[in-house]
Amino acid sequence: MANFGLDDLRLVNPRQGWPRTDDYRDVAYSAAAGATDLLDAARVFASIEAAVGDLRAVYATTARERGQMKAVLSPSAAMGATAAAVGEKRGILFGPERTGLDNNEVAIADAIITFPSSPAYASLNLSQAVLLCGYEWFKAAHGDKPPPSTIPRVVSPPAQREMLLAFFNYLENELDENGFFRPVTKKPGMRRNLRNIFHRMELTQQDVRTLWGAVVRLAEGPRVEVKTRKRARQKNTGA
Amino acid sequence: MANFGLDDLRLVNPRQGWPRTDDYRDVAYSAAAGATDLLDAARVFASIEAAVGDLRAVYATTARERGQMKAVLSPSAAMGATAAAVGEKRGILFGPERTGLDNNEVAIADAIITFPSSPAYASLNLSQAVLLCGYEWFKAAHGDKPPPSTIPRVVSPPAQREMLLAFFNYLENELDENGFFRPVTKKPGMRRNLRNIFHRMELTQQDVRTLWGAVVRLAEGPRVEVKTRKRARQKNTGA
């Protein structure tokens, strides 16, 4: 629930009462992984009717369609309608883990939510059913996008064409000097293929600087101290 | 995974080895709730690189965007693309429960999947992340619809207009006799409102028979044996 901004938890007639005072209390608070406000604020009702009294619509979740004359919706359809009904309080009814909702409980709802799933393993557990409803609610209400990053992201702007062409020229020149374009009649085609590979990458300016640096190292050999570089080159060329 | 028709589970270098031979084995098989084929068929790899070697694309799941220069997709966008790439094997990479994937592991992937969620509680646990990816995969590959019902459903056809009008006539006649339409000048509007309520229900033929029967009972009083009905009526009307 907290993952998806839901905060109104209503418990109907819990077998062991609520709040629990035994060991289960610690288990529940630990499993809530920080979202303990939800547990503290949970309200207990004696019946489903009492729990849904103030709501404008109620969905019942079932593993399979029940043959009741009632609309059967996917979670996304139900949550899309809920997000569209701005200012209207709606509820989602989940059954006990083992038995699910019985037919009389389903009858209290306006419509049924059933989950798209493999016919061979259609049954989700309670936490999974809550998760999928919350997830579809969040997508419908807040959009299908990741939470904002907390890492300040330095986005390098896309490389301008001028920068790309300068890189291509440098690269192709080095390749040419090293005898890459053979036979020479194939050079125009090979050049085009090579450029297309880089164009597909949608390179940023930083990407081009990184690649350019890599090509320089490949072409010039290991980096050496400035004062010894000249000597090293002379040695490499046998001068 | 089994809920959503996924069956290729790959484990990378599990700390305690796999298959487990201790008590955890029983815990895992019990938690699988019938989907034990998945556990039996799980394959172990020594590295992520080895695990993804035969795949055409790999998604890395992260709780938040990581500032890597890599596409960040919602599960629905990633699974939509995966379903569209028919015949192309793709994989989803999940990190260990506590730490998630580190940056080097994320770098192995082609793109990142991050989950739409409340910024206050963005982090999903491993099973939730797997569930949401599986769910979006199933929706993209098989459609956003509930599994077929196993209960043979006898669907009553929609009530034909003729049947509805006959019911309205009967109802309005009974109401008229009982002095419902007062003041009489408001009768046309009251009649329209009443009919619109029933039209909104999109009644089936069975629905109309049910409602008609209910109105008959309300209008005629308790059902009595045929041979005594006449007498009962005479008594009611004081005859």
Image: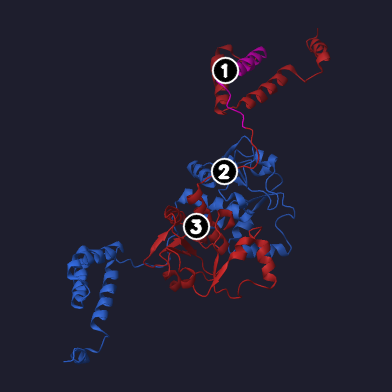
Chain colours: A red, B blue
Answer left or right for A142 relative to B207.
right
Write down the chain letter for disc 2: B
Are discs 2 and 3 both within one chain? no
Residue A59 picture quarter: bottom left
User: How far is disc 1 from disc 2 in space, using C-alphas?
Assistant: 36 Å
Q: Which residue is mark 1?
A: A162
In this rendering, does residue B119 appear at all? yes
Q: Callout 2 environment at 10 Å: few (<14), some (14 to 19), or many (20+)?
A: some
SS under mark 1: helix
Q: Which residue is mark 3?
A: A118
The numbered disc on residue A39 is none
Which residue was labeled with disc 2? B90
Q: Is residue A194 magenta?
A: no
Q: Earlier in the sequence, mark 3 or mark 1?
A: 3
Task: Answer yes or no: are tags 3 and 1 on the same subunit.
Answer: yes
Q: Which residues are magenta?
A: A155-178
State the image coordinates of residue B238 (x, y, percent, origin top left).
18, 91
Q: Position of residue A236 (x, y in %)?
A: 79, 13
Measuring 66% from the left and 62% from the top, which residue is drawn there? Answer: A31
Q: Position of residue A162 (x, y in %)?
A: 57, 17
Q: Chain of mark 1?
A: A
> How many other residues sit within 10 Å of disc 1, few (<14), some (14-19) or many (≥20)?
few
